[in-house]
Image (cartoon, rainbow, N blue to C red):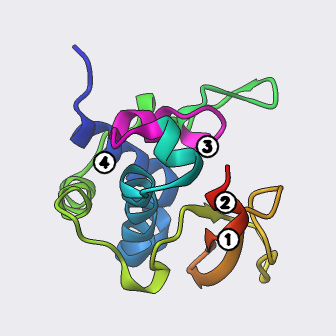
Amino acid sequence: MPLTDRELLARLIRCEAEGEGDDGMKGVASVVMNRVTVPYGEFFRLVHGDIRAAIFQPRQFTCVMEVVNGQYNPQNIYNMTPLQTHYDIADWAMTGNTLGAIANSLWYFNPFKPSCISFFPPGENGTYLTRVKQHCYYIPTQKYAST
């Protein structure tokens, strides 16, 4: 039985940010929904307002990949069973809410160190905005608009 959009988002939230607390999980959910609703650029062209397309866009979320660097990735959305809090945050995001601190961020990244890089992803399409727990959040630059 195929997973619903709600189920997929709840699984992604758990897999990508469970240890980040409510704000960290809301930040991840907000980025997914920002990609779904952004009115220009790469995500607009490729996602077309579809949550599934945002989640499954290649090489965007480690938790969607079953193989990472040639090794099986046991922490993937297919192995995650969401808890009620993950569904609640998915519902919160799917009804149009976003974590204000991350604004219109389209990317997040865990640098596994105290500082965040200035631009992400490669190509300088996003510029650093803020950090929530372990994740650094990036808003689109003017360059992103032409992607």
User: Percent from the top left, x then y, of residue 98?
Assistant: 32, 73
Task: Kindly identify the amino acid type of the residue bearing the numbered disc 4.
Answer: Ala
Indicate the secondary structure of the residue bearing disc 4. Answer: helix
Furthest toward the front, the residue is 146
Task: Kindly identify the amino acid type of the residue bearing the numbered disc 1.
Answer: Thr
User: Percent from the top left, x then y, of residue 146?
Assistant: 67, 54
Query: Residue tagged by mark 3?
Result: 60
- For the residue pair 57 and 44, the one nearer the viewer reads as 44
Side of 121 relative to 86 (left or right): right
- How far apart are the alpha carbons under marks 3 and 1? 18 Å
Q: Which comes before the other along the chain, label 3 or label 1?
A: 3
Q: Is residue 52 above or below residue 86?
A: above
Q: Which comes before the other along the chain, label 4 or label 2?
A: 4
Query: Residue tagged by mark 1?
Result: 141
Callouts 1 and 2 close, C-beta under 8 Å: yes
Query: Residue tagged by mark 2?
Result: 144
Task: Kindly identify the amino acid type of the residue bearing the numbered disc 2.
Answer: Tyr
